[in-house]
């Protein structure tokens, strides 16, 4: 009888613990929220041939960066959230780089700092050299901290115009390594489509389930001016005023932001407008140097900021005044972002209705965006 009672007590206790664990019952009658999973990521490594013949390719990369970013920022995860976007940049095939490093270098690590990517792109120059695609792919896999999650979209884009098989690292083994890491290699041959097939560019992409594309690297980017450009440009200037630099590198990062506006405008006002649209999206975030973004991530950041690295007006504020000032600029920036996004939608519609009638020539941005959308479907990414 005693054993029977003990067994019953244990059974009831186990049942109650199970209920509590499942959140079906608690003393406060409130279920605890389930922790959200890690954010899905889009991780891209762009490997650009910077040999003598590739000036047109580099020019396209500079002029089309913000088109690519805007397409990426339109992505949604299956659960409705927005993925984190990280981009890395490599150059290869340049005589100015060490032979011992296969004439390649990592220009930027995987980063969310879009101003850094833009600055480094504008710093690239061409110089004749040997183009070792297999080596470049292999090193980009080994040098970068790629996610191990199967849910994340991980892609390498390699662009060039010499045979894909050059160098002492076979492209087959490099692509095999990519596949083992769930990284898709997409190849972009700068020249005739069939020549790219003959020189193994298509085969390299096929090995990882990636896309092979050919582009005309000397094709100039065509911009369509719209009635919305001037207003977006003015809003961009207003948005820049909402950035509060902090930290030892804050001021230089703020100056870099303005410099990249100017670099974008070098091609046209329409290109600067595309950058402004990128800046109004979730993809453009600068928590490392901007107090508005940093405060959104962690309100306690204001307690640890060194006043001497703040803009002059804020150096005299007490903690409550700083908090009120940051909140005011946060609200102002959000309002500007929403207005830019609304104008961006109208701008897209205008461009769709006023496209040139002639068929567009394949360009770097088209090649990348088409491939990202295609492979993105396999990761449950939706592009608006």
Image (tube, rainbow, N blue to C red):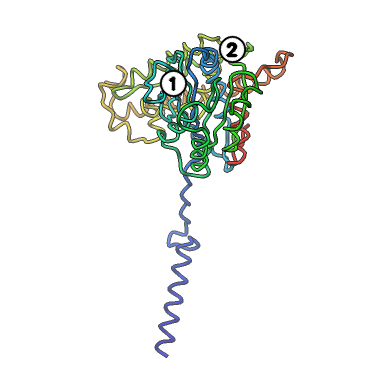
Residue farthest toward the bottom in the current orientation of the protein: 1
Q: Residues within 10 Å of mark 2 (few under 14, many from 20)?
A: some
For label 1, the residue is 115
Q: Which quadrant of the view contains residue 327?
A: top left
On the rendered structure, is 208 left or right of 169?
A: right
- Measuring 50% from the left and 31% from the top, which residue is drawn there? 44
Q: Tell me, for residue 219, which label it has, or none.
A: none
Q: Residues within 10 Å of mark 1 (few under 14, many from 20)?
A: many
Decide which of 185, 196 is in the foreground and name it: 196
Give me the C-alpha separation between circle 2 and circle 1: 25 Å
> Looking at the rendering, in which quadrant would you find the N terminus?
bottom left
- Measuring 43% from the left and 73% from the top, which residue is drawn there? 13
Q: Is residue 216 visible?
A: yes
Image coordinates for residue 249, horizontal then vertical, percent: 31, 22
On the rendered structure, is 74 left or right of 118?
A: right
Badge 2 element: loop
Image coordinates for residue 215, horizontal then vertical, percent: 62, 20
Decide which of 360, 178 is in the foreground and name it: 178
Decide which of 227, 74 is in the foreground and name it: 74
Image coordinates for residue 78, horizontal then vertical, percent: 59, 42
Decide which of 285, 8 is in the foreground and name it: 285
Q: Is residue 48 above or below residue 170?
A: above
Q: Is residue 235 visible?
A: no
Q: Is residue 13 above or below residue 376?
A: below
Q: Tell me, for residue 218, which label it has, or none.
A: 2
On the rendered structure, is 98 left or right of 32?
A: left
Badge 1 element: helix
> Looking at the rendering, in which quadrant would you find the C terminus?
top right
Image coordinates for residue 274, horizontal then vertical, percent: 55, 18
On the rendered structure, is 101 left or right of 224?
A: left
Q: Which quadrant of the view contains residue 273?
A: top right
């Amino acid at each position: 009888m005693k054993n029977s009672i003990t067994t019953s007590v244990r059974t009831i206790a186990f049942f109650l613990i199970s209920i509590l664990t499942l959140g079906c019952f608690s003393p406060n009658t409130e279920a605890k929220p389930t922790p959200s999973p890690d954010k899905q990521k889009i991780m891209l490594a762009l490997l650009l041939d910077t040999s003598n013949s590739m000036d047109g390719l580099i020019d396209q990369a500079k002029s089309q960066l913000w088109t690519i970013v805007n397409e990426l920022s339109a992505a949604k995860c299956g659960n409705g959230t927005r993925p984190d976007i990280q981009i890395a940049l490599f150059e290869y095939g340049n005589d100015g780089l060490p032979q011992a490093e296969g004439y390649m270098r990592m220009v930027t690590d995987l980063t969310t700092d879009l101003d850094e990517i833009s600055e480094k792109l504008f710093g690239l120059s061409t110089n004749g050299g040997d183009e070792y695609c297999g080596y470049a792919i292999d090193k980009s896999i080994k040098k970068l901290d790629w996610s191990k999650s199967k849910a994340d979209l991980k892609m390498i884009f390699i662009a060039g115009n010499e045979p894909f098989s050059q160098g002492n690292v076979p492209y087959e083994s490099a692509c095999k390594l990519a596949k083992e890491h769930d990284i898709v290699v997409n190849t972009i041959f700068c020249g005739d489509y069939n020549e790219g097939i003959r020189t193994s560019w298509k085969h390299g992409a096929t090995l990882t389930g990636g896309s092979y594309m050919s582009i005309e690297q000397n094709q100039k980017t065509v911009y369509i001016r719209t009635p919305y450009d001037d207003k977006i440009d003015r809003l961009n200037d207003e948005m820049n005023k909402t950035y509060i630099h902090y930290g030892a590198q804050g001021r230089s990062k703020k100056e870099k932001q303005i410099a990249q506006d100017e670099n974008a405008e070098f091609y046209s006002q329409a290109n600067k407008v595309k950058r402004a649209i990128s800046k109004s999206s979730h993809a453009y975030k600068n928590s490392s140097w901007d107090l508005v973004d940093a405060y959104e991530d962690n309100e306690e950041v204001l307690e640890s900021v060194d006043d001497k690295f703040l803009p002059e007006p804020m150096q005299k504020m007490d903690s409550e005044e700083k908090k009120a000032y940051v909140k005011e600029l946060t609200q102002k920036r959000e309002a500007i972002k929403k207005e830019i996004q609304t104008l961006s939608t109208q701008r897209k519609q205008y461009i769709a209705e006023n496209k040139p009638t002639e068929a567009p020539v394949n360009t770097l941005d088209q090649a990348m965006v088409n491939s990202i959308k295609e492979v993105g479907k396999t990761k449950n990414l939706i592009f608006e």
